[in-house]
Amino acid sequence: MAALLETCLPGLAAPKRGKVREVYDLGDTLLIVATDRISAFDVVMANGVPDKGRILNQMSAFWFERFVDLCPNHLVAIDDDRIAARIGEAWSEPLRGRCAIARRAEVIPVECVARGYLTGSLYKEYRASGGGVHGLHLPSGLLDGDRLPEPIFSPATKATEGHDENISFEEMQDLVGQELAGRLRTLTLEIYSRAAEHAEAQGLILADTKFEFGLVDGELTWIDEALTPDSSRFWEESLWQPGRAQPSYDKQYVRDYLESIGWDKRPPGPTLPDDVIQRTREKYVEAYSRITGMPF
Ligand SMILES: Nc1ncnc2c1ncn2[C@@H]1O[C@H](COP(=O)(O)OP(=O)(O)OP(=O)(O)O)[C@@H](O)[C@H]1O
Ligand SMILES: [Mg+2]
């Protein structure tokens, strides 16, 4: 079983490459191919996790569809036969299951993050600032991984290089306008609570998640990916214990390995050993089946 690391599709202009996805321009629409690349600490590893792109693509489709009552999304097609027919000679079997045709959006330049638990970059800033962070009015004395009194909206700017930067709601209003900022906050929190409820029923905590939105013909549209392990922190409920870093649902084996070799977290990413790849793949497969209720 080989991982798909890169694509170069005949007859199509070179794609825009993100850390995980390759985005081909089809005119009005985009062909988005989810590869098997995996990143840790914002650096892409030298090898990939077989089927990871398929799992992310199909998990996103599951959530987009589930919450279509809350927000229109960018998907036009994820059915392989339709996609193959649309892209003709550019189609090949390795693309199966990992493609989406999406409406091209004018991307809103803010990452919309909802957090039900305090951890990661926001926890670091909270610690460093003694509590008052980005105007969020968080209670004092929270530990890493503590549940927040209620979910918060914590926007971030899309950094072109490296880490995203958390901003206050006021800063977001300056960037996108008051009206749109308010709509995005409401929508982000609505989707988060519905998804967290669903995850909880499967024994998973959805600690936080990041959405991207855009405008398609002036209409607010949910784009990119939806509630995958790459864009969200899922924690095993039974292992949750505030006061320490929670085990990462999907990338723990990768992180443990990287720590064990004393990697300096600077690109290029190292090659992960086979057993780390296999165990990581199993976690993605398990996430898919627990969340969607269907076998992968
Ligand atoms: N419907 C859409 N219209 C326009 N751009 C889109 C649409 N959906 C997704 N994108 C963009 O396509 C890219 C997807 O690639 P990928 O997820 O690998 O991105 P990345 O930003 O490098 O990584 P990360 O998600 O880790 O920040 C992103 O830049 C995203 O904003
Ligand atoms: Mg992305």
Image: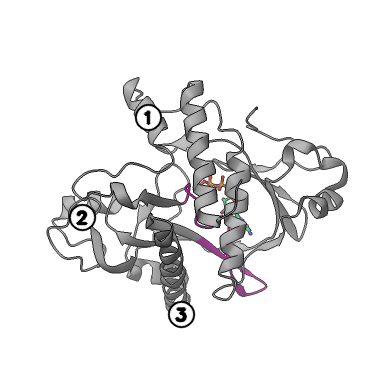
Residue 269 visible, this orientation: no
Give whichever of 12, 150 is nearer the camera.
Answer: 150
Up/down of 56 relative to 185, above or below: above
Q: Identify residue type, mark 3.
A: Glu
Q: Identify residue type, mark 1.
A: Lys
Q: Which type of secondary structure does the marked residue at label 1 adopt?
A: loop
Q: Identify residue type, mark 2.
A: Tyr
Instruction: Tell whether label 2 touches label 1 (CB within 8 Å).
Output: no
Q: Quadrant of the N terminus?
A: top right
Disc 3 residue crowd, few under 14, some 14–19, many 20+, Cα 10 Å? few
Q: Which type of secondary structure does the marked residue at label 3 adopt?
A: helix
> What whole-number distance in Å separates the C-alpha atoms at marks 1 and 2?
23 Å
Residue 51, located in which quarter of the rendered image?
top right
Give whichever of 40, 293 is nearer the camera.
Answer: 293
Magenta stretch: give its range.
212-231
Residue 163, located in which quarter of the rendered image?
top left
Image point (42%, 62%), residue name = 201
